[in-house]
Image (cartoon, rainbow, N blue to C red):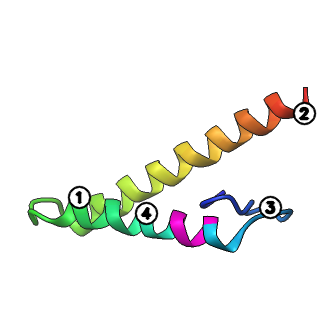
Amino acid sequence: MIGGTLLTGGVGYVLGSVVGTLVLAALWMIITKDGSIKPEYLTIITGGILLAFVLLQRVLTKRRSE
């Protein structure tokens, strides 16, 4: 889920997706601001952040269904 839109399909909001994308871009800019992190590590960090949010989405969706 990025900003409220499920990646597997379903109901979501365009505004939530836009906000989620802006947050991800802001994190990327904050991480790269000083220039000391190599682009390869930036990709790994971004992937880790996305993985954490996907896992969080799974946990929250499972709790709601119970």
Residue range in magenta is 16-20
Q: Earlier in the sequence, mark 3 or mark 1?
A: 3
Q: Earlier in the sequence, mark 2 or mark 1?
A: 1
Q: Earlier in the sequence, mark 4 or mark 2?
A: 4
Query: Which quadrant holds residue 34?
Result: bottom left
Q: Earlier in the sequence, mark 3 or mark 4?
A: 3
In percent of width and height, residue 38 lies at 19, 64
Q: Mark 4 packing: few (<14 Cα in 10 Å), some, or many (20+)?
A: some
The answer to which of 18 and 58 lies nearer the viewer is 18
Amino acid type of the residue that numbered disc 4 sits on in the rendered structure: Leu
In percent of width and height, residue 19 lies at 52, 66
Q: Secondary structure at mark 1?
A: helix
Q: Quadrant of the N terminus?
A: bottom right
Mark 3 and mark 1 residues within 8 Å of each other at the beta carbon: no
Residue identified by numbered label 1 = 31
Q: CA distance from mark 4 to mark 1?
A: 11 Å
Q: Nearer the viewer, mark 2 or mark 3?
A: 2
Q: Earlier in the sequence, mark 2 or mark 3?
A: 3
Q: CA distance from mark 4 to mark 2?
A: 28 Å
In percent of width and height, residue 24 lies at 43, 63
Residue identified by numbered label 3 = 8
Q: Quadrant of the C terminus?
A: top right
Amino acid type of the residue that numbered disc 1 sits on in the rendered structure: Ile
Residue identified by numbered label 2 = 65
Q: Residue at x 23, y 60 (%)?
A: 30
Q: Residue at x 43, y 62 (%)?
A: 23
